[in-house]
Amino acid sequence: MRNFVDFIIKNINSIIFLILISISISQIFSRNYYHGSKINLFSNSLLNSINEIKTELFEYFDLVKINQKLVIENSFLKNNYNNEYDYDSIITENNYRYIPSKVISNSIKFSKNFITIDKGSFHNIEIDDGIITNRGVVGVINNVSDRFATGISILNSQLKINAVLKKTQHFGSLYWTVINHQIMELEDIPKSANISIGDTIISGGMSSIFPRNIPIGVISDFKLPESTNYYEISVKLFEDFGSLRNVYVVKNDFRGEFNDLKNLNE
């Protein structure tokens, strides 16, 4: 403390000078519009430059992650699509078409979550079209306007989707228990299935909404309750719904025919 006081006493003149200079400069810029605008312009330019550098640094350090995602997505496109296009949509060799869209809003904290995308009826989006990414099933379109659409997320307690154990081809129903946005539950897999942690779960293709073999996740935990023949299986999703940005709307050109035939049987 004594050293600090000695420092103040020795440099009192310099300290007073700096204080007076600071007050003078402050008065000049606060009372003079020209000087004030110049300093504001300089400070804003400096701040923007710093933010630009910061953004470039973040983007640079994210390049590895971005490249990994691009490799996965390019592989997905190469294996599933051909080179025919129609109104910003990607045409497959079978009856499914994929329309790229961007997520406008997305919730994960409620028991009934929904997604809003930037494509609507003008882009041929219809109710009951599926929503996917290259990393998994996302949801089902439930409302459409001219330029936008909303979908029921698979993180919705009222939605179940058909899923298949890739290794054994046993199928069941996937649903959300409103506990963890990265974990869903798979039911109706019989104990005769040889399952293990890390087994891949894919879409079953047993409805008119989603094609078969879309990746969904991996088994993270399972148990076989006593006096039952079916597993209780937890599935960790490949897709992180907390950072959902780009999706594909899935259109089945034969959905009407499929549903008509199904209704006749029912």
Image (cartoon, rainbow, N blue to C red):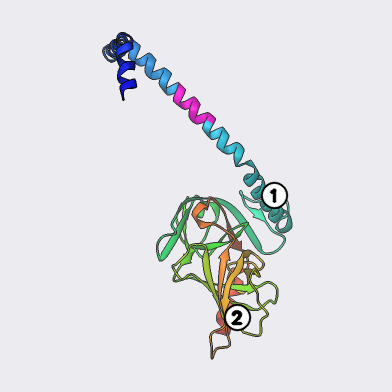
The circle drawn on residue 52 is none
The tag earlier along the polypeptide, 2 or 1, is 1
Q: Nearer the viewer, residue 44 or 103?
A: 44
Three-letter residue code for mark 2: Ile
How much space separates mark 2 and mark 1, taking CA atoms?
33 Å
In the picture, the quarter occupied by the N terminus is: top left
Q: Which residue is mark 1?
A: 71
Which quadrant holds residue 255?
Answer: bottom right
Above or below, comparing residue 112 to residue 18 in the picture: below
Q: Main secondary structure of the magenta part?
A: helix
Q: Which residues are magenta?
A: 46-53
Q: Is residue 102 above or below residue 186?
A: above
Q: Secondary structure at mark 2?
A: loop
In the image, residue 59 lies in the stretch drawn in magenta:
no
Residue at (64, 64) in percent of width and height: 214
x and y, in percent, of residue 8 in the image: 31, 16
Query: Element at badge 1?
Result: helix
Residue visible at 69% across and 56% down in the picture: 76
Judged left or right of residue 8, residue 256 is: right
Decide if residue 11 is in sight here.
Answer: no
Q: Where in the figure is residue 241, as x and y percent of width and height?
A: 51, 57
Within-10-Å neighbours for mark 2: few <14, some 14–19, many 20+: many
Which of the 4 quarters of the picture holds residue 95? bottom right
The quadrant of the picture occupied by the C terminus is: bottom right
Q: Position of residue 33 (x, y in %)?
A: 30, 12
Give the residue drawn at x 38%, y 14%.
Answer: 38
Q: Is residue 264 left or right of residue 44?
A: right
Q: Amino acid at mark 1?
A: Val
Name the residue nearer the viewer: 66 or 23.
23
Picture disc at residue 189: 2
